[in-house]
Amino acid sequence: MNITFDLNTIWFALVGILFSGYAVLDGFDLGVGALHLLTKTDTERRLMINSIGPVWDGNEVWLVTGGGALFAAFPIAYATVFSGFYIAMILLLFSLIFRAVAIEFRSKKTQRWWRQLWDISFSVSSILSSLLIGVALGNLAWGIPLNENHEFIGSFWSLLNPYALVVGMTTVALFMMHGAIYIVLKTEGELQDKVRGWVNNTIIFFVLCYITTTMVTLVYVPHMTQHLKNYPILFGVAILTMLAVANIPREIIHRRDFRAFLSSCATIVGLLALFGIGVFPNLVYSNPLSAHSLQIYNAASSFRTLKIMLYVVIIGFPIVLSYTISIYWIFRGKVKLDTGSY
């Protein structure tokens, strides 16, 4: 299939960019949460929470923006995904809510049992959110059963297939690595030294999951590699992604923490780019009847709607990007605890 850069393709790329922004930004938030219980003292846990304290809620704006873009550009796909994945979406929503509540409520009381309760909530919610995001991506790659009306005809338990769970575990590992590097970047002293040791373990965990997912994809999900075979130039994305992964331990060894974090960001973007290349032009791949798949053409809004919304994005996206950059610039540097900290 020839790739043409029409409005539908442009919107496919825009939705991917917005969700990639969410994965990069909220990914380290979720990773910090997944690692939270590995620390023992209250001070260390406060430092970890406060490392993401000024930015975590702003990071989730990218998820809302991505969902809004999907609804505006591809409403049929939006309806199918949100109705078919309803229970999973509710679980994800509750996980994100309890994670947010844990961050805000933990510091309200000083009792040990109270803080341990919210520490557990913060960590478990972060791990579950990461897992569910990965499971959703795994199902979109593997395919879900759709009827001729593009309605999901499976069950919640069918979404928990082995391939989706492997992708989910890989996502957890990726975010844990991303979060560990971010903590090293934002802390100093004893906690930084401790987390620096975690980075190597999270890298190993991620690489093992990444290799496993790649092998399983090549064997059992061959349609995800079809475009790489048809357009060899796209294989460059895979090579750049592997180089980004390989550069992370190199930068960590040389204590170039910011470069390691940039390489981790590039890894996430590269993996999602490979995912987008693999599923294109499908938005929701139908398995076993691929003829029922929702693509960027049969699931899209009208040409006029896509055109008008593109103007909205051209105006709004720089605002969101400027806000994000300004927040990170304002709260740059090492995290410090004071009376206003969580």
Image (tube, rainbow, N blue to C red):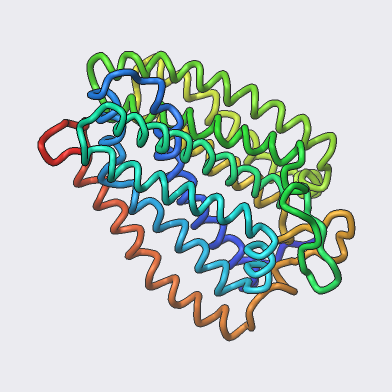
* Residue 282, above or below 173: below
Residue drawn at x 65%, y 48% as measured from the top left: 137
**Residue 336 relative to residue 248: left or right:** left
Residue drawn at x 82%, y 48% as measured from the top left: 223
Question: Split into 4 quadrants, where in the image is the N terminus?
Answer: bottom right
* Residue 47, above or below 277: above
Residue 70 pos. (x, y %) = 57, 67
Q: Quadrant of residue 340?
A: top left
Q: Quadrant of residue 222?
A: top right
Q: Residue furthest left?
A: 339
Question: Foreground: 95 or 183?
Answer: 95
Residue drawn at x 65%, y 29% as measured from the top left: 210
* Residue 207, above or below 28: above
- Count the numbered circles shown: 0
Residue 38 pos. (x, y %) = 41, 20
Question: Split into 4 quadrants, where in the image is the C terminus?
Answer: top left
Q: Quadrant of residue 313?
A: bottom left
**Residue 48 relative to residue 221: left or right:** left
Residue 31 pos. (x, y %) = 45, 34
Residue drawn at x 21%, y 43% as measured from the top left: 331
Residue 135 pos. (x, y %) = 65, 44
Question: Foreground: 220 or 308?
Answer: 220
